[in-house]
Image (tube, helix red, strand yellow):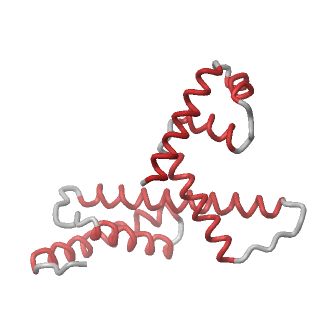
Amino acid sequence: MPSVDPAQHQAIESLYAEHHPWLCAWLRKRLGCLEHATDLAQDTFVRVLLQRKAFELREPRAYLSSVARSLMIDGFRRRALEQAYLETLAARPEALEVSPETRLLIIETLLEIDRLLDGLGARTREIFLMAQLDGLSYVEIARRLSVSVNTVKKHAVRALTHCLLAAED
C-alpha cells in the first residue's frame, strides 16, 4: 500500500477505533458467532482501506455495514455453493476421490460462473441454465415457461453474448 500521510493515518486510526467494536457487534447479531464477526469486520476494514474510502466517509457506519453485508452475502453464497457441490458428490453412486486442490478449483470455477450469471436477468439466466445444464431444447424451454420459441432464442443469445464478453475481459 502506498505511504500514508499523518492526517490520513489519523483518519484510519479514528475510523477503526470508533467503529470496529460497533461493527463487530452488528455482525455478531447477524452471524451468531463472535469469531466470524471479528474476521468479517477485519475484512471489511481492509476492503475500505484498499478502496481508499476511509478518508471521505460521511456516514461511516452506513458504509461499513454495506461493505460488511456484501462480504457476508459473498460468504453465504460461497458456503451454499460449496455445500451443493459436496451434496452432489455425496449423491454420486460411485466413489469419487477428489483432491483438496481439485475441489478448490471446482468451487472457484462455480463461484466465477455464479458471478458471471449474476449479471443476467432472472428470465435470461433461467433459460440459459435450462439449455446448458438441463440440456433442454428451445422448444421444450418455451413450452415449460409458456413463452414463444423466439423469446427463448433472444434470451439465449443475450446470455451467450454476455458470457462471451465477460470471457474476453
Task: Give percent across and percent down for residue 121.
Answer: 50, 36
Residue located at (72% from left, 22% from top): 143
Residue located at (47% from left, 62% from top): 29
Q: What number of labels is visible?
A: 0
Residue located at (28% from left, 59% from top): 61
Task: Give percent across and percent down for residue 167.
Answer: 49, 52
Task: Give percent across and percent down for residue 146.
Answer: 67, 20
Horizontal side, residue 36 vs residue 47: left or right? right
Choose top left, top right, bottom left or bottom right for residue 104: bottom right
Choose top left, top right, bottom left or bottom right for residue 122: top right
Task: Give percent across and percent down for residue 92.
Answer: 85, 60
Residue 112 in the image: above or below residue 15: above
In the image, 62 versus 106, the foreground residue is 106
* Residue that protrudes farthest toward the right in the picture: 93
In the image, 96 versus 15, the foreground residue is 96
In the image, 9 versus 157, the foreground residue is 157
